[in-house]
Image (cartoon, helix red, strand yellow):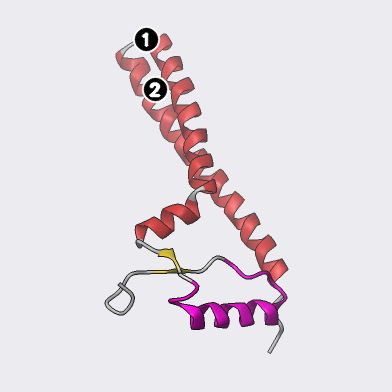
Amino acid sequence: MEKINFYDQIERNKRLSWILVVVVLVTLFFMSIVISLVLYKVYDIGVMFLFLIFSTVFNIAYILYTYYRSADIALSAVKAYPADDSKFQQLHNIIEEMAIAGGLPKPKVYVMPSRNTA
């Protein structure tokens, strides 16, 4: 079995994340153009440009917010909370052992509520 280089995986994930960001941004931009063309037909060119400016600023802000807050969004979606060191000592030990074995820093540990952990 080939040994996994986690640093290569991290770089690959970052690269794919930025590709996804660009694809979403381009999609939102084209949707904004279509809506602005409809606004141009109904109103005038001034309304169209105002909408394009507003939507471009909104789209960039949305992409940046979701990119940098994606972990928090995912954790809150499943109602995960930080694992208490004393209550989840075995879990912390296992994760720390795995991090040491992989030569990586120990990550933050979260647990999702269930009948066993709530």
In the image, farthest residue toward the left: 115
Q: Dot 1, how many residues are within 10 Å of its Cα: few (below 14), some (14-19), or many (20+)? A: few
Q: Is residue 116 above or below residue 106?
A: below
Q: Is residue 33 above or below residue 112?
A: above
For mark 2, give the secondary structure: helix
Give the magenta part as a residue range: 85-107
Q: Position of residue 68 (x, y in %)?
A: 54, 47
Q: Position of residue 110 (x, y in %)?
A: 46, 67
Q: Position of residue 106 (x, y in %)?
A: 63, 70
In the rendered structure, find residue 44 and report the number of the disc placed on it: 1
Q: Position of residue 1 (x, y in %)?
A: 68, 90
Q: Residue at x 37, y 16 (%)?
A: 40
Q: Residue at x 48, y 21 (%)?
A: 53
In the rendered structure, find residue 37 and report the number of the disc placed on it: 2
Is 92 inside the magenta-drawn segment? Answer: yes
Amino acid beneath label 2: Leu
Q: Earlier in the sequence, mark 1 or mark 2?
A: 2
